[in-house]
Amino acid sequence: MIQTVINDLLNIEYPLIQGGMAWVADASLASAVSNAGGLGVVAAGYASTDWIREEIRKTRKLTRNPFALNIMLLNPEAEKIGQVAIEEGIKVIITGAGSPGKYISAWKDCGIKVIPVIPSASIARRMEAVGADAVIAEGGEAGGHIGELNTMALIPQVADAVNIPVIAAGGIGDGRGIAAALMLGAVGVQLGTRFLVAHECTISRAYKETILQAKDTSTMVTGRATGHPVRIIKNQLAREFQRLEKTNALPEEYEELGKGSFYRAVREGDMEMGSIMAGQIAGLVRKEQSCREIIAEIFEEAEKIIIEKAYCFKKDKILR
């Protein structure tokens, strides 16, 4: 079995973290991933603190294994959500869309490990300097909000830039992706899109069917003009965003068009004007499985590749 420093750092069986997808990563999905040996994640997104507290407590009832809380720092309630994490005894916080610098001392004083999602080597160094325990380096192949660098280029540069563990994300959906991430210098992976079609994922049926039918060219990046690009499945909403870009629309117009669109896709099944966030690996996803089946299958494939086809690397240099 593939073992890295991440297994010990997070007390998990596989060096895998489930993506913190707002409105997707609830107690059902998080507990299933944790029960399968990865690190399940409850995503706070823009949810109320009451909902977040309830999902944390539900997750704890469904699994005895470690799980994390994802906090999007753009949320004006981020500090309150962090306090909920402390009160509920969360042991791992994953952050995105900002720096956890002003919160990190209080979190770490409570024994919480902090793992920011980062898009570049310079930000990775900054996160190491403020005390992050590891970083998730996410390439532009990922779904949702993305940076400009792609995973193949990003991971080795981040691995060279910091001394803390680097977890790879973006464009990883099977054992080949895991093996590649480890070769690039990562010591673990984060998967989001692959879990959208897990049995335990509670998104709308229409969303799952859209992922299952996706091709390699099914996604596009919208909102570059706003400075906050987002990768989504092509649909009417995506075409409307393209129209705004061509007319040099104001940021407020983008905001109005996108308001509530992800919720509409996830919970209401609106595949035309809903924001169907998905990574480029959607074209690889062809069947629904349980989280346990997904994780076991992809790590079995990765281990086989590493042992048998890792281009002259010896087993004891890759596996601990």
Image: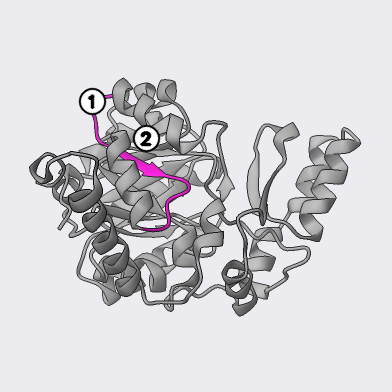
Q: Position of residue 201 (x, y in %)?
A: 46, 73
The part of the image, by quadrant, that contains residue 180 is: top left
Left or right: residue 115 compared with residue 91: right
Q: Is 125 located above or below residue 149 in the figure? A: above
Quickly name the residue at label 2.
Answer: 103
Name the residue: 37% across, 35% down.
103
Q: Give the residue at x 8% y 43%.
A: 316
Q: Main secondary structure of the magenta part?
A: loop
Residue 62 rendering spot, x and y as whole percentages: 29, 76
Rendered location of residue 199, percent (x, y): 43, 78
The quarter of the picture where the N terminus appears is bottom left
Image quadrant in which you'd find residue 112? top left
Asked if 191 appears above or below 199 in the picture, the reply is: above
Discs 1/2, front: 1
The residue that appears at 69% across and 58% down in the rendered structure is 275
Circle 2: element type: helix
Q: Is residue 169 above or below residue 64?
A: above
> Does residue 206 appear in this view?
yes
Asked whether the viewer can see residue 22, the reply is: no
| Residue at image mark 1 | 163
Q: Earlier in the sequence, mark 1 or mark 2?
A: 2
**Magenta range:** 162-174
Q: Amino acid at mark 1?
A: Asn
The magenta stretch spans residue 75: no
Residue 58 in picture, x, y percent from top left = 35, 73
* Residue 14 appears left or right of 284: left
Q: Nearer the viewer, residue 103 or 210?
A: 210
On screen, residue 42 above or below 183: below
